[in-house]
Structure formats: structure tokens, C-alpha cells
Image: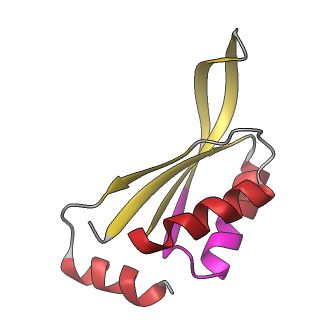
Amino acid sequence: MDNLIIFITASSRGEAGEIATNLVGKRLVACVNIVPGIESIFTWKGKLEVAKETLLIAKTKAALFPRVEKMVKKVHSYECPEIIAFPITRGNKEYLKWLRETTR
């Protein structure tokens, strides 16, 4: 697929804003939605963790994923940040055209 939705979790609204601003500013993604106040439950280094996080939902071209991942890892506070991508299989043609034109 040519386009992706990428989920990224961040430790705070501030960190999410910094990541989103960098991604959009460098035209690595067309848009980022920031969803504050999620609760994540996971195991990390053998210990059950519960964390308040912020979710970023980014839309981009599949070819840009390696650059998105590299940039997120550069500014993210986590040792192992969640950066997972899903193909966009269908969508509003005008929106997908805008996505392609807005990113590098």
C-alpha cells in the first residue's frame, strides 16, 4: 500500500506535540491527530506497568516510514517507543491526494 496510518505513543502531551511538530514541519507526515489521556497497561522488563500516555495518529506515504521512525526515535523519551504502521487500503480520494502532495 502507498499510504500508512502510524500510531505512536508518547509520555506526555508536550512530548506528543514536539514529535507532531517535527514530523509535520519536516513534511514527513501530512497530519497528526493527538489523543491525550489514554491509559496503557503493558509488561516492561518483567514488570506490569500502567501509564498515562498520549497517542499520536499520523498519516503519511509508506516510503517515508523509515524517516518517520528515525525522527521519532531521535526525540522520544522512551527506550523502546511504540511506532506501528497500518496500510490505508481505502479513503477519500481527495484526502489521499492531499496526503501525497503534502508529504515529501
Q: Residue shown at 50%/73% (left/top)? A: 64
Q: Is residue 52 left or right of residue 58?
A: right
Q: Quadrant of residue 43?
A: top right
Q: Residue lying furthest top in this view?
A: 47
Q: Is residue 91 magenta?
A: no
- Figure coloring: secondary structure
Which x, y percent locates residue 83? 56, 48
Which residue is found at the position 43% from the left and 73% from the top?
63
Along the line of sight, the residue nearer the viewer: 43 or 53: 43
Give, as a single range, the part of the protein colored magenta. Answer: 20-33
Left or right: where 5 falls relative to 39: left
Q: Position of residue 1 (x, y in %)?
A: 26, 66
Where is 99 relative to 45, above or below? below
Q: Position of residue 85 (x, y in %)?
A: 43, 52
Instruction: Give me the residue at 76% from left, 63% from top.
Output: 18
- Magenta stretch contains residue 22: yes
Residue nearer the viewer, 35 or 21: 21
For residue 101, what is the image quadrant?
A: bottom left
Residue 48 appears at what percent x and percent y?
A: 67, 10
Question: Which residue is pictured at 52% across the width and 73% down the height?
Answer: 29
Figure disc tally: 0
